[in-house]
């Protein structure tokens, strides 16, 4: 009956015309796969010779998933019969559908992970399979055995298999011990005929080499020696590996084509990394921290080293790979203008495989290449040939090598004091000169790849994005090349295409009409010139400038004559090409810092006004294409060179007042500034560009205005913006009356006035870009009535309230302590406005006030009252997981405020009842909300809650409070602490995503430490009677055996005990971590790596399958929270 239901559901899923029926069948099948009966039914369907292909595949997939995640459902006595049945099915389908065979192989591999070594016999899992397949004919046995040997090592690190962590580690060791047997079997398979067999052998060989994620495996070399008859006297096993038949077959496969070639490439790449030993110290002269394992491992102190014993294998590999250079050149010819006759007919995938080999050699053997001897020229030249390949995807494969080599040449050669600094400098220069021709050739090969194609305008959005990304990659590689060549030499190479164009043509007698400018911005017109056909190749010029701006970081010599000459040429480039002018402006922006250094040294003073004038002129081009780049150039010039702009201030203020009428203001009500003149209607700018100009002028005025004129200059900057806001506010009129019953509320103010929020943001830019805190305080005082009126008028509009509060926050940050005169007003008004709007940004504003005034005890009375009032009001409705989940911003800002208070003024939250703090409402509210918020899924909000718990329980918090604070914290936290421990343990067990285990571990050990004897645990304290460990013991006792055994719990408890004995580290008291950001433990107060590793182990244990995770959560969470969490998981499909 069950089998017939299954087949009917499959038939409906694949063949029914009704989509609703298909969805219902899909849901039924997913539910059925989780049932216990799926084991026997799927097995029966697969053994039925009349079952359909669809049923066979689905049932094979079902058995695979059941073995992977539900193996613990099976009684131990059923394991052997399951193994035998799967083996029979695999043999049955050896000549059947490959997808079914693959699913069965994966099922057997998963079974091997679950079943311990002793149940496979003395020879291990590999020998067990070999014995079972040996009586069968080769055409039946080989496909199955080779696919099994391929997937077995791949499943070692598969977290789809719900296995205990210690069993996963044990299986990895078992497979490494089986390496010799696997190599022996693979070697014997090489004698079988058929190209497909050879391909499968090489695929399996590469899989076993990759068993330890690319790290060198001593067992591999030992296994190779054992299967080759043993090493000679004193001969290292790695040397024997060089003569191994599998290595020889892999090298021979490089001369094949198709699948065999690609399998050989994979195998040889893994062989390459077995010759590298990351445990050896990097050779002298290597100190680049970026070079290391391809998987991010290694010592991090330089390129991986090669043991002397590995040299025979290296000497066998590298010449064979370098022998592919001629074949690669032929493939490059096919990828270019035409194909040449040759022995091979390689496609692009084959060329990519050869390029990969060249790159792997370069990166793995960096410690040899960096020695800069003639023998290393061949790999470097091969990588230059990769760079020259027409397809950028293949070309860019070499970029990581050039980056690492550059880092080695610049930062390497650290001998640890054995050589003099002069000798090191001389050796570094010798190596740099050795590789200089290669880097010069690299620059010449890639500089043209950034040129925009004539058909660029017709590309799709994704194609344009891909082209821009490729330009950025080229720019990064040019930056690496400049580090080796030096800025001057690299600049001279990059200027060559620009110089070859000659002098640009003279400008036209009159600017083109706006229509022509817009056409140029869209890529129209003559592809090699402007609409008049003067023939200037602006695309080549633009590409050259893009490359030149990419190396700006290396322009360190003030007054560099070649760079100054280049920048002086920029104003003369044709202005009728907006794309070219946009890159001109971005080049100016990149070299603004160099210009400032040069002017400091007395160079290039006239150049500033020329470049600033060019950027302003480009801002007014009739096309909007280059306005963002022009605005950015002005911003960077003002930011870096503002101190030298005294002579330009009047012009900048004129530009400032002009752009204020553009952007969002173009649609705003006219007021004191009027509307745009008719002549300027075509110069409308985007609001983002207007704000860049506002920021630029404010920064220039802050730097260039004399101290006695800064207040007046601040007024000149503020008043136009403030007047525009007054006009907007007047146009809004009074607030509408509350709607009557059944009447829908009016639309938010921002939706009917789209100019409003951008106009408010302009004031934020003025506050944020003015450097003088006293001037900002004056601006804030003058602006407060308008901001308060906007808060009142727009109380019903969440977006506008957020923008107004953001502006207020910028003002408070800019004014700092100078805002003290406004503090009483803010403390009086903000709670009322929060009550009216319940906008979480009010909490963030108060956190800024706590930051600046929290250490001043004269403000304690008012600050403690506003904290108690705001926190209590904010937390009042946050009484369930559903309300917290629906208000993540409120939760986030509430606990960020709590973190700020703990960081800057913990006494305000932990003050005993009395005149200073009327009560402990704020602390109680935060603790009650935290008991729910610690299990919410929203990443930022949950991170703030957990950071708050960790900081609250950290010793540094009470250390900065009066003695009575400890009693306050103990009175309110102790009754809640056992529940906190259970909740946090449930977060580790699976309530929260695995990425948050680190911060949960910090919060958990903080609460446990809080319950230790005395106020807090410290190093060396006897914690045998610790309440905290008692809480943790009780919580662990509740976890069922299906999730964690008694020994698992005891190990976890032991790790907690060890962490408490170690005690907190003395860090985290500075202001840099006062906020907490949800990404890690603030301050690292109990920064014990062993404890965090134990938490991660416990998390892996409880999350190994759905059954274990749900059992742990159900046992640890209160009933109402467990139901809410379960509902959330169902919605997310967990």
Image (tube, helix red, strand yellow):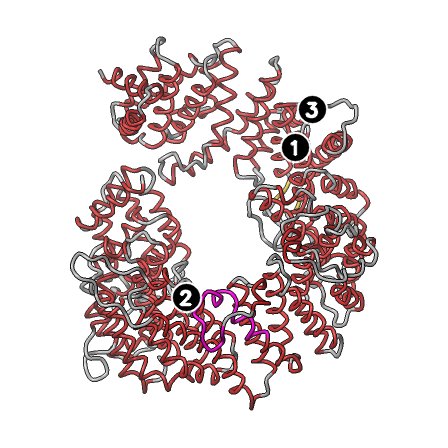
| SS for dot 2 | helix
Residue corresponding to mark 3: 252
Q: Distance between the residues labelled 3 and 2?
A: 68 Å
Quadrant of the image occupied by residue 103: top left
| SS for dot 3 | helix
Quadrant of the image occupied by residue 462: top right
Mark 3 vs mark 2: in front: 2
Q: Earlier in the sequence, mark 3 or mark 2?
A: 3
Q: Give the range drawn in magenta.
A: 655-674
Residue corresponding to mark 1: 353
Q: How far apart are marks 1 and 2 (CA)?
A: 54 Å
Residue 854: x %, y % from top left: 35, 79
Q: In this view, does 403 lie to the left or right of 920?
A: right
Compared with 869, 169 (above or below) is above
Residue 901: x %, y % from top left: 33, 73
Q: In this view, does 240 lie to the left or right of 502?
A: left
Residue corresponding to mark 2: 757
Compared with 179, 501 (above or below) is below
In the rendered structure, are the residues bearing label 3 and label 2 in contact, judged by CB atoms less than 8 Å apart? no
Residue at coordinates 38% horizontally, 34% vertically from top-left?
161
Q: Which of marks 1 and 2 is nearer the N terminus?
A: 1
Query: Observer-nearest residue: 842 or 124?
Result: 842
Q: In the displayed orientation, state which residue is furthest to the bottom.
A: 708
């Amino acid at each position: 009956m069950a089998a017939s239901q299954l087949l009917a559901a499959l038939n409906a899923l694949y063949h029914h015309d009704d989509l609703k029926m298909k969805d219902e069948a899909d849901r039924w099948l997913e539910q059925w796969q989780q049932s216990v009966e799926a084991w026997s039914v799927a097995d029966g369907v697969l053994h039925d010779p009349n079952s359909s292909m669809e049923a066979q595949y689905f049932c094979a997939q079902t058995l695979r998933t059941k073995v992977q995640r539900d193996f613990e459902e099976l009684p131990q006595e059923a394991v052997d019969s399951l193994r035998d049945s799967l083996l029979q099915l695999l043999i049955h389908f050896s000549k059947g559908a490959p997808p079914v065979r693959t699913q069965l192989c994966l099922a057997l591999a998963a079974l091997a992970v679950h079943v311990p070594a002793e149940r496979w016999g003395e020879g291990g899992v590999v020998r067990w399979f070999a014995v079972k397949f040996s009586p069968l004919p080769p055409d039946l046995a080989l496909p199955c055995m080779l696919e099994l040997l391929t997937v077995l090592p791949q499943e070692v690190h598969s977290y789809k298999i719900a296995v205990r962590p210690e069993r996963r580690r044990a299986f990895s060791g078992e497979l490494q011990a089986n390496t010799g047997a696997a190599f022996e079997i693979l070697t014997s398979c090489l004698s079988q005929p058929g190209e497909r067999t050879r391909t499968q052998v090489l695929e399996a060989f590469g899989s076993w080499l990759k068993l330890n994620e690319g790290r060198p495996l001593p067992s591999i070399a030992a296994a190779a020696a054992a299967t080759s008859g043993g090493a000679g006297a004193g001969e290292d096993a790695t040397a024997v590996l060089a003569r191994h038949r599998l290595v020889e077959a892999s090298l021979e496969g490089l001369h094949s084509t198709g699948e065999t070639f690609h399998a050989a490439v994979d195998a040889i790449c893994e062989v390459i990394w077995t010759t590298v030993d990351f445990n050896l110290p990097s050779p002298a002269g290597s100190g680049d921290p970026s070079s290391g394992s391809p998987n991010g491992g290694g010592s991090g102190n330089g390129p991986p080293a090669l043991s002397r014993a590995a040299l025979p294998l290296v000497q066998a590999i590298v010449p064979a790979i370098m022998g592919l250079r001629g074949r690669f050149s032929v493939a490059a010819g096919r990828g270019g203008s035409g194909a040449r006759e040759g022995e091979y007919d390689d496609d692009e995938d084959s060329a990519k495989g050869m390029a990969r080999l060249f790159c792997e050699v370069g990166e793995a053997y960096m410690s040899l290449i960096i020695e800069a001897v003639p023998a290393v020229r061949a790999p470097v030249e091969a990588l230059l040939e990769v760079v020259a390949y027409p397809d950028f995807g293949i070309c860019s494969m070499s970029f990581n090598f050039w980056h690492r080599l550059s880092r080695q040449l610049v930062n390497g050669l650290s001998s640890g004091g054995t050589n003099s600094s002069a000798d090191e400098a001389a050796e570094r220069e010798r190596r740099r000169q050795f590789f200089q021709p290669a880097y010069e050739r690299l620059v010449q090969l890639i500089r043209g790849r950034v040129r925009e194609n004539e058909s660029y305008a017709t590309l799709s959005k994704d194609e344009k994005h891909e082209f821009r990304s490729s330009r950025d990659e080229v720019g990064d590689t040019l930056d690496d090349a400049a580090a080796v060549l030096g800025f001057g030499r690299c600049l001279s190479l990059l200027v060559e295409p620009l110089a070859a164009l000659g002098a640009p043509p003279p400008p036209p007698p009159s600017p083109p009409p706006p229509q022509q400018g817009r056409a140029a911005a869209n890529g129209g017109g003559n592809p090699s010139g402007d609409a008049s056909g003067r023939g200037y190749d602006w695309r080549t010029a633009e590409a050259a400038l893009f490359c030149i701006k990419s190396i700006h970081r290396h322009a360190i010599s003030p007054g560099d004559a070649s760079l100054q000459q280049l920048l002086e040429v920029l104003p003369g480039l044709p202005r009728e090409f907006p794309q070219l002018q946009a890159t001109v402006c971005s080049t100016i922006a990149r070299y603004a810092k160099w210009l400032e250094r040069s002017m400091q040294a007395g160079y290039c003073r006239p150049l500033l006004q020329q470049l600033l004038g060019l950027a302003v002129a480009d801002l007014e081009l009739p096309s909007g294409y280059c306005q963002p780049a022009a605005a950015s150039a002005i911003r960077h010039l003002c930011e870096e060179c503002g101190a030298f702009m005294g002579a330009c201030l009047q012009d900048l203020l004129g530009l400032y007042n002009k752009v204020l009428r553009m952007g969002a203001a173009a649609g705003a009500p006219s007021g004191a500034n009027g509307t745009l003149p008719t002549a300027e209607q075509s110069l409308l700018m985007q609001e983002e560009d207007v704000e860049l100009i506002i920021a630029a002028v404010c920064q220039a005025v802050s730097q260039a205005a004399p101290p006695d004129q800064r207040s007046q200059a601040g007024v000149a900057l503020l008043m136009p913006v403030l007047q525009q806001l007054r006009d907007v506010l007047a146009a809004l009129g009074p607030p509408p009356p509350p709607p009557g019953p059944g009447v829908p509320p009016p639309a938010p103010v921002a939706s009917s006035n789209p100019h409003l929020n951008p106009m408010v943001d302009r004031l934020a830019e003025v506050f944020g870009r003015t450097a003088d805190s006293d001037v900002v305080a004056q601006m804030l005082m003058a602006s407060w009535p308008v901001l308060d009126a906007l808060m009142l008028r727009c109380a019903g509009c969440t977006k506008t309230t957020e923008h107004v509060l953001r502006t207020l926050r910028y003002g408070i940050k800019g004014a700092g302590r100078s805002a003290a005169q406004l503090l009483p007003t803010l403390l009086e008004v903000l709670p009322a406005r929060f009550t009216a709007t319940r906008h979480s940004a009010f909490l963030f504003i108060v956190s800024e006030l706590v930051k600046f005034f929290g250490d001043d005890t004269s403000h304690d009375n008012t600050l403690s009252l506003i904290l108690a009032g705001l926190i209590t009001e904010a937390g009042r409705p946050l009484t369930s997981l559903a309300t917290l989940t629906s208000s993540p911003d409120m939760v986030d800002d509430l606990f960020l405020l709590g973190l700020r208070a703990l960081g800057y003024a913990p006494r305000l939250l932990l003050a005993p009842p009395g005149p200073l703090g009327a009560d402990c409402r704020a602390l109680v509210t935060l603790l009650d909300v935290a008991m729910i918020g610690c299990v919410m899924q929203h990443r930022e909000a949950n991170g703030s809650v957990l950071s708050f718990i960790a900081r609250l329980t950290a010793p540094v918090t009470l250390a900065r409070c009066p003695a009575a604070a400890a009693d306050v914290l103990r009175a309110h936290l102790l009754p809640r602490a056992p529940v906190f421990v259970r909740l946090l343990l449930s977060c580790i067990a699976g309530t929260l995503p695995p990425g948050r285990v680190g911060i949960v571990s910090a919060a958990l050990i903080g609460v446990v430490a809080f319950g230790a004897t005395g106020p807090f645990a410290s190093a060396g304290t006897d914690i045998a009677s610790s309440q905290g460990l008692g809480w943790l013991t009780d919580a662990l006792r509740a976890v069922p055996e299906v999730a964690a055994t008694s020994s698992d719990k005891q190990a976890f408890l032991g790790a907690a005990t060890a962490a408490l004995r170690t005690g907190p580290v003395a860090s985290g008291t500075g202001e840099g971590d006062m906020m907490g950001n949800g990404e890690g433990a603030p301050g690292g107060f109990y920064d014990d790596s062993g404890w965090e590793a134990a938490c991660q182990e416990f998390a892996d244990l409880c999350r190994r399958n759905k059954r274990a995770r749900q059992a742990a959560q159900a046992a640890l969470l209160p009933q109402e929270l467990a139901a809410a969490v379960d509902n959330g998981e169902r919605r997310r499909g967990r």
